[in-house]
Image (cartoon, rainbow, N blue to C red):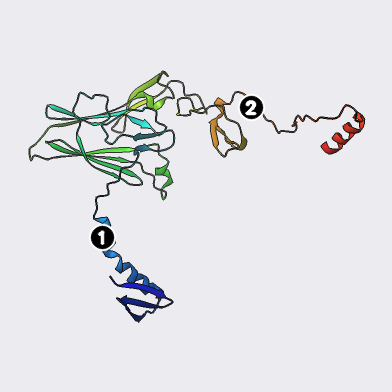
Amino acid sequence: MARIRCVGSHAFERHGGEETLMKFTSVASCAVLLLAATTGQLASAQGQDQTLRAPATPLVVHDPYFSIWSMSDHLTGGPTRHWTGTRQALNGLVRVDAKTYRYLGDTNREIPALEETHREITPTRTIMNLQSPEIELKLTFLTPAFPDDLAVMARPVTYLTWDVKSRDGATHNIALYLDADGNLAVNHPNEEVTWSRAEIQGLHLLRVGSSRQAMLQDWGDNVRIKDATGMVEAMTIRTIRLRSANGTLHIFPYSEAQVIHNHTKVFSSYLFEIVVNYECDLDRALAVMAEVGE
C-alpha cells in the first residue's frame, strides 16, 4: 500500500524506499487522496454485519407524561411502558380470515405472534414490519413534531397507521384490533378511570381519563415526585423547579407542595459551638465573638 504524508500544499508518496513529490493546489486535495487510500478498509468494515438495536423503541412520544415505549426485543415480547418503566399497555391483534395473531403487546400470550422482520426509527416515526405466512403488516407510529408548524407540533396526538398486503397471493379478510389500558391516564393502577365514546365529523372517538383531574393540578399524570430540597429556580402557574445541591433539577406541581420551608428568606441562623477556657474573661470572649459575627 502506498503511504502519503502531507506537508503544507505538498504531499510525498512513498513506494518501498523511494519518495515522490506531488504538488497540490490545496491541502483539501491531499485530504481527498488520504480518504481514497482508506476507502477499501471502510468498505470492508461496512460489509460486516453490524446490527444495532435501540435500548427502547418510541411509540407514543408527545411529551414526558404521554410517552409510551416498547422495551422488549420485539413488539410482542412484553408490555409497552412509560419511559419511567411503569406498565402502560397497548395491545394489538389482527385476524386473518379465521386465524388471529398478536402484533403488539403480550397480554394474550396464548395467541401466536407475528414475526417481526424490520424496525426503523426516525425523529418523527417508528416503522415496523411483521408477517405471517399469509400477510405482511406494516405499522407506522407518527408523532408530528414538526418545528416549522408549531400548531401541529402542539397537538397531543400520535397517529398509528396499518398497511396490510398478501404474501401468498391469495385474498384474505382482515380485521384489526387495538386497545389501550386505562393505566395510561392515571398515576397508580388503583386509581379510578372514566371512559366515553363520541363521534365528531365522521370520526369515531374513544376517551379514557382519570375521574379526579382537578383544575391546574397533575392528578393522574405520571408525576412520581418525592420529597426534594434545593434552591428555587423557577415557579409557574402549575409547577415549582428546585435545584438540589448535587445538581439534580426537581420539577413538581403545586398540588404536591403541602408545606414549603424557606431557610433563607429575611432570616437565617447557624449554631456554632465554641470552646473557651474556664479561666478566660467571658465578657472579653463574648465581645470578640460578637465582633467576628458582625
Name the foreground residue: 199 vs 284.
284
Please indicate, yes or no, whether residue 141 appears anywhere in the rendered image: yes
Q: Residue at x 75, y 33 (%)?
A: 266
First in sequence, mark 1 or 2: give its number: 1
- Residue identified by numbered label 1: 43
Image vertical order of residue 149 relative to residue 212, above or below: below
Q: Position of residue 237 (x, y in %)?
A: 57, 33
Displayed quadrant of residue 246: top right
- Residue 20 in percent (x, y) is at 33, 81
Q: Give the image location of residue 125, x and y in percent.
A: 32, 44
Q: Along the horizontal axis of the image, is 270 left or right of 225?
A: right
Q: Is residue 90 left or right of residue 272?
A: left
Could you say which quadrant of the image residue 108 lies in? top left
Mark 2: which secondary structure? loop
- Look at 36% across and 46% down and name the residue there: 123
| Rendered residue at 71%/33% (across/down) | 265
Q: Is residue 294 visible?
A: no
The CA distance from mark 1 to mark 2 is: 62 Å
Q: Which quarter of the figure has residue 236?
A: top right
**Residue 171's spot in the image, x, y percent?**
9, 36
In front of the other: 270 or 171:
270
Q: Residues within 10 Å of mark 1 (few under 14, many from 20)?
A: few
Between marks 1 and 2 in the image, the one whose residue lies nearer the viewer: 1
Q: Which residue is mark 2?
A: 260
Amino acid at dot 1: Ala
